[in-house]
Each structure stands twice: as C-alpha cells, then as structure tokens.
C-alpha cells in the first residue's frame, strides 16, 4: 500500500540509490507538505518500505527495491499521472514500460590526477549565463528560462544545489551542478562547456571539483550519462559504472 511519506522514514529509505538522492533533495527543498511536490512510500505486509515515489510538478522519480509490488506501483502511477518517469532501467522494465531514454549511472571513486584549480563554486552564479550555456550545449529539457531559474534558485537557497563554474575572462566557459544535495549523497548533472572551448577538459574540471568536494565530506557522488564514449570519459576521470537509469515519457495512458 502506498501512503504519504513522513520525512524521517523517507530520508532513511532514500539513502539506497541515486533516485533516492533526487527524492531526498526534493524533500529538503520543498518539504513533505508542499502542494507542488508530493511524496509517498510503499510498504509490504511486514510494514517494511519497498519503494518511494516523488511527484515534482509533472515528473515522477521512483526508487524501488527488487521486491516492491510493481503492479501496485504501476496502478498508482496511472492515478497520480506524470509526463516523465525517472527510475532504474530494471524498474522501468518491471513496470512494463519501454524506456524513452536510458544510460549509465556512474559513481565517483577518487581523483586520478590533481585538480587544476580553475573552477569556482559561488553560492549564486549568474543563472542567466548558465542557462544560455546549457541550451547552447543541447540541454533541451530545461523548460522556460524564468521557471528554470526560479526552481534552481530555490534549491540554492535551501543548500540543496551547488554550481561549479569556469570563466574565460568574463565569458562562462564551463559549468556543472550538484543538482540534488542530500545528507549522505549528491547527484550531479548539467555538465557543459562552450563549443569553442571544448577539448580543454573544462567540463571535466567543473564536475570533478564538485565530486571531490562532496566525496571528501563522506557523501556518495553519482551522475547519469548516456551510453557511448562519455562512459569512458567518466571512467578516466575517476568514476565507475554502478547501474543503469531510464526515463519514460508518457505518450499514452499506461
């Protein structure tokens, strides 16, 4: 049975994986009584939590144990509705869904070479510059600029997001973000570099600056990447594949 989640039980369960990190980040940002973001947990007959669900606006994040009741989860998702579901690839398959996108979950282990010290971690970077860089780098799922800036600003105000940026003069050359910062883990993303400045390792420097910071604090650090050569890039940067992610965009009722 799925019920609205209480904060402590949800945070305890969400230590388990990267999807739990995202849910915990949403909880720390919006709280359990937010109207825009809702949280539920599934319990088995032994009153043990087997899954956590977060609906943030029209997107859903799902973290589930292998023994979760996937038929119940499938029916629940139909009831609450969503535009995009994010979960483990195996969970997506157990729900009977064919992923729209999928790739590798990689976890930071250690630096393979010292940082160059080029990246800064300001509390409030110029998000207009960041948004422009991301859009020009192919990030086409950010939504409108004002809405995106409002959401990211809220996370920064709650200390659940942190940017790493590199400037070339007054031009933003590269960025990366700790998108979801939880007590025990961090989820990274938005890694980008200006097209005319690629090949200089700036994006890698930006993301590794964040990875090293949070790893040194004892937090697990993970990010999603697509299949292909980017996986080798992260392996050579001190990350290791630990699983697979999937996203499902609903085009019809499931």
Image (cartoon, rainbow, N blue to C red):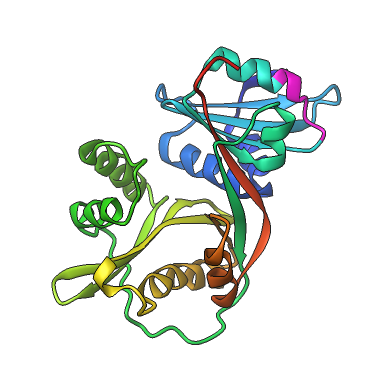
Instruction: Please tell me which residue is depicted at 58% across the width and 62% down the height of the picture.
Output: 219
Read off the magenta span.
67-72
In the rendered image, residue 162, in percent from the top left (x then y), is placed at: 37, 58
Instruction: Please tell me which residue is depicted at 35% across the width and 80% down the height of the picture.
Output: 200
Measured along the vertical axis of the image, is residue 118 above or below residue 10? below
In the rendered image, residue 147, in percent from the top left (x then y), is placed at: 26, 36
Residue nearest the observer in this picture, 250 or 112? 250
In the rendered image, residue 213, in percent from the top left (x then y), is placed at: 47, 71
Measured along the vertical axis of the image, is residue 217 above or below residue 158? below
Instruction: Please tell me which residue is depicted at 28% across the width and 46% down the height of the picture.
Output: 153
Measured along the vertical axis of the image, is residue 38 above or below residue 199? above
In which quadrant will I find the C terminus?
top right
Is residue 137 toward the left or the right of residue 13 in the image?
left
Quadrant of residue 144 within the rendered picture: top left
71 in the magenta segment: yes
Instruction: Please tell me which residue is depicted at 60% across the width and 77% down the height of the picture.
Output: 110
In which quadrant will I find the N terminus?
top right
In the rendered image, residue 207, in percent from the top left (x then y), is placed at: 43, 67
Looking at this rendering, what residue extends furthest in the front direction? 228
Is residue 152 toward the left or the right of residue 186 in the image?
left
Is residue 138 toward the left or the right of residue 253 in the image?
left
């Amino acid at each position: 049975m799925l019920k609205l989640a209480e904060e402590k039980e949800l945070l305890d369960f969400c230590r388990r994986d990267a999807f739990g990190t995202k849910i915990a980040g949403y909880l720390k940002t919006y709280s359990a009584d937010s109207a825009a973001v809702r949280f539920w947990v599934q319990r088995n007959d032994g009153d043990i939590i087997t899954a956590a669900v977060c609906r943030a606006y029209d997107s859903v994040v799902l973290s589930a144990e292998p023994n979760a009741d996937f038929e119940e989860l499938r029916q629940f998702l139909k009831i609450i509705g969503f535009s995009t579901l994010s979960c483990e690839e195996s969970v997506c398959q157990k729900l009977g869904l064919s992923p729209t996108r999928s790739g590798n979950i990689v976890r930071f282990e250690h630096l393979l070479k010292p940082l160059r010290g080029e990246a800064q971690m300001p509390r409030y970077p110029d998000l207009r510059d960041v948004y422009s860089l991301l859009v020009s780098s192919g990030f086409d799922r950010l939504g409108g600029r004002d809405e995106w800036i409002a959401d990211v600003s809220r996370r920064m105000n709650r200390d659940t997001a942190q940017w790493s940026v590199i400037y070339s003069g007054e031009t933003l050359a590269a960025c990366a973000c700790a998108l979801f910062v939880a007590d025990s883990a961090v989820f990274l993303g938005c890694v980008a570099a200006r097209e005319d400045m690629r090949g200089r390792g700036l994006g890698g420097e930006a993301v590794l600056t964040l990875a090293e910071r949070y790893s040194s604090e004892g937090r697990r650090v993970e990010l999603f990447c697509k299949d292909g050569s980017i996986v080798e890039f992260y392996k050579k940067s001190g990350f290791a594949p630990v699983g697979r992610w999937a996203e499902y965009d609903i085009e019809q009722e499931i």
